Every structure is written in C-alpha cells, then in structure tokens.
Image: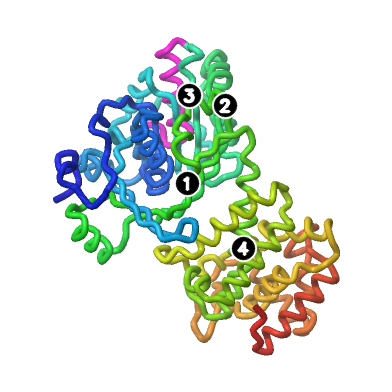
Amino acid sequence: MKLSNKILPQIKNNIELPLANYKDLPVKVLQFGTGVLLRGLPDYFIDKANKQGVFNGRVVVIKSTGANKTDAFAEQDNLYTVWVKGIKDQQPMDEISINSSISHVLTANGQWPEILQEAANPDLKVVISNTTEVGIQLVNEDIHQSPPASFPAKLLAVLYRRYQTFNSSSESGLVIIPTELLPDNATILKSILVKLCRYNKLEPAFEAWLLEHNSFCNSLVDRIVPGKPDNAEVQRFEEANGYGDDLLIVAEPYTLWAIEGDERVKAILSFEQADEGVVVTPDIEIHRELKLRLLNGTHTLTCAMALLLNFDYVNQATADTDFARFMNSILADVRLAMPYKTDKETMEAFSAKVVDRFSNPYIKHLWVNIAQQYTTKIGTRVLPLLHQHFKQTEEVPQNIAKGLAAYLFLMTKIVEQDGKCSLEINGVKHVFTDEKAGVLTAIYSSCSPDSIAAYVFTSEELWGADKPAYPALINEVQKYLDEIAAGKVII
C-alpha cells in the first residue's frame, strides 16, 4: 500500500505520525522548490514544530521546473517520509517520521493564477526558496507574464499582488529566506527585486513597501540529504514498514539552518524553538566560518591523503584508526587558526559533529568528488587559516603541512589529454576538474621535484597576492612531499 492519509492508522514500527488535525493548520509558508534539501531541512523543521504545537502552519510549494505534474504529491495527500540515518553524538541513529508540512503543490507553468491567489492569504508569513545558485539571477522581464520566467520575477509578482491586496499595510510584509548556497543570498535577491521593480516601472510606494515591510534574511543551510535510497533499500523499507512512498527521502542526523534576523523575524519563525539546528541571529557569519573551515577545510586537507591511501569513501577512511587520528589532528590545527574567532567550546562541539558526519555509514561520499577544483578549495578554505596561523606564531602547523604535501603529490597524478583532465590513481583514471590544472602541470614540468613546494606556494598565478609564501611552511611541506614520493606513510 502507498502512503496516504487513510493508511496512517495502519502504520506501526514506532514511526512518528502526523497530528490528527494536521489538515486544519493554515498555510503560513510559500516555498519555491520541491527538492530534497527543502523537504529534508526547512520542511522537516516546520513539521517537527507543528508536532510540538509551536509553529502551527503548513507550506504551499511552487514547482517551477520539469513537467507540470504534481501527481506524486497529490497521490500521497502531500505526505512523505523522512528517514534519518547516521551517527549523532557518536551513537547510531535511525528514525523515521511522516512529514505533513506540505499543504499542496502548485505548478508555475500550469497554475500561475492560483499561485497569485496565495498572495492574498492573510495567514501567510514566510517565503522560502531553493532554486539553485543559478536561480538568483537578474532577468529583465515583465512580471505580469503568466508566469514570469525567472524566480526573482515570480517572487516580485507575488509580492506585488500581496501589496495590492492588502493596500500596502505594514502587517502584510513577509519574511523572505532564500536557502541557495550563495553568501549574502537574501541581500543579492533583494537588490535584484529592486532592479526588477524599476524595470517594470512599478510605483515608488510599492518599492518602499518592499524594502520597509519585508524582511530579507540571509541564510546558511547544511544537511546532507541524498534523497531516495536505492531500490534494494526501498524494498527493505517497504517490507519492514508495510507501505511504499514515492517521495521517501533519507537524511543525515546533522541539521543547520542559520538565519540572519532580528527579534521580529525570530518571533515569526517560531519553529526555531523545535530544533537546535535552527538558529535565528543578527549575524550568521560564525556559522559560515565553522562550516567553511572545520567541515569544508578538513575535507580539503584530508582528501588527498585519503586518496593516496586508497580510500574511496569518507566513512571508509574515518573507520581507519590512523586516518581518524590524522583527521582529528587536522581539526585541532584548524581550530587554532580560525580567522573568525569564537569560543573553544563552540569549536570543539562543531568538530565533534564533523567527526559524526564523516563517520556516517549511510552516506557514500566519494573522496574523488571532494577533490574536484582542489586548488580553488585550497585557496578559499585553507589559505585564510594559514595567514591567521602565522599571525599568531611562527611554528608550522604540522598536520596542515602534511595535508598540503599530499595535495601537491596528488596533483602530480594529473593527466591531460584532448583538452580534458583526469587524475590517475593506482592505474585508474578519474574525471577531474581544476581550473588551475594547467598552471600546476606547467610548474611541475619546469622545476625539480625538490623545489615543487617553493614554486607552487609562491605562485601568484595560482594564488594571487594571497600566496602562502612562508619559508618555514614551504620547507616542511617539501619535506613531507619528499617522504610521500619515497613511499613513506606520514600520518
């Protein structure tokens, strides 16, 4: 049997079910996007809050891409299952809940008039979007089309209809939270809306209402939501739980939705109370820095070493005692060099969550995928750490030096053929993209092996003026590079 409202009484196995009166909750959220991240993070939080009697509101979802079909949602009464599997606080976690946060789904191409009608809903408080980074782009177009092509134009059309419906009242303004993976995503979106407003020659009073009575909140999201499991896992799920779900998604335990907002925003987003993963604060930069340095930076600084040690997946490497020790040493080095300072307890707590996430046996995260655009990642994630470190001390961070040496050695495995790059590891060629690959191979072909570190880390072509030309670091990296080249294990 397939998931629907009528089979809920038959579901057992400690699965968390919706409230009996979930259909009575008003629509409070307009969401652009049906993707697994939205369903596995914002909608997950909203559902959790509803079950705790906190937010008490549902979501109307706008589908803007693909076919004009919402059959999978309609057939299941807009219910779907969230299966959280992984490691939390070093303990296995396996929890299943049925999410009832979505009220209904509308297609932009087929139901645009109905979408505009949602703007007249007095209960509406929040707009959420995830249209990918490409979605937040300025397209000069008429917002009175049915529908406009771009996401910003669609949003502006909805806001304009709301402004007209409620006679520009201050109370009708919304909290707008883009979750696209762009720094200052709401600031960018707001500037695009202003430009579109002027392109469409909308009245100055509307622009004033847009800017004064709507809260545009930069946000940062972080949760791995692989989506629907493979066929074998789906079959095991159905056999164990007695129902099928075409919208089933798997998610890791870790959650973060950091939202930049004041007390008014905090009050409207009352679902913050339901989960520590939602943080509404005037400044989200610390959350961005923790993720960029401790999570992403550690990925980058351990990736090459993992590949050289023949580990395919992240969790496979972290299960190895020696590698786990190396990873924890990297985390310690990173904590000491964080450019954006915070307290020791916060950094250590985040580091523990990083270890949990890397150890998740249900996430098959390939190291070779993490290696893509390796040089750019070193530049954005690691160089600021090095500069901060050497402001504090002249001592070389040994584990970071080992990670950089492994990176330099891995880059000797670049193979260029017919204008394409690959990484050849143990005789196997992997697709590889690095916009600086040509610069690296040119350096490697023009210098002796014992001077690679010096040439690479003093190259302005690679790093610009931000180059990490610290003599002590270069000497240590070269020493470790020589040891790796000689076949020695340095972790």
Q: Nearer the viewer, residue 17 or 225?
A: 17
Q: Is residue 156 left or right of residue 118?
A: right
Dominant secondary structure of the residues highlighted in magenta in the image: helix
| Residue 375 against residue 27 in the figure, above or below | below
- Viewer-nearest of labels 3 and 4? 4
The three-letter code of the residue at mark 1 reads: Thr
**Residue located beneath label 2 in the image:** 194
Q: What number is the disc on residue 132?
A: 1
Q: Position of residue 219 (x, y in %)?
A: 55, 39
Magenta stretch, residue numbers: 147-167
The three-letter code of the residue at mark 2 reads: Val
**Residue located beneath label 4 in the image:** 298
Q: Is residue 462 left or right of residue 193?
A: right
Give the residue at x 44% y 28%: 126
| Residue 199 picture quarter | top right
**Residue located beneath label 3 in the image:** 174
The three-letter code of the residue at mark 3 reads: Leu
Q: Are marks 1 and 4 in contact (CB under 8 Å)?
A: no
- Viewer-nearest of labels 2 and 1? 1
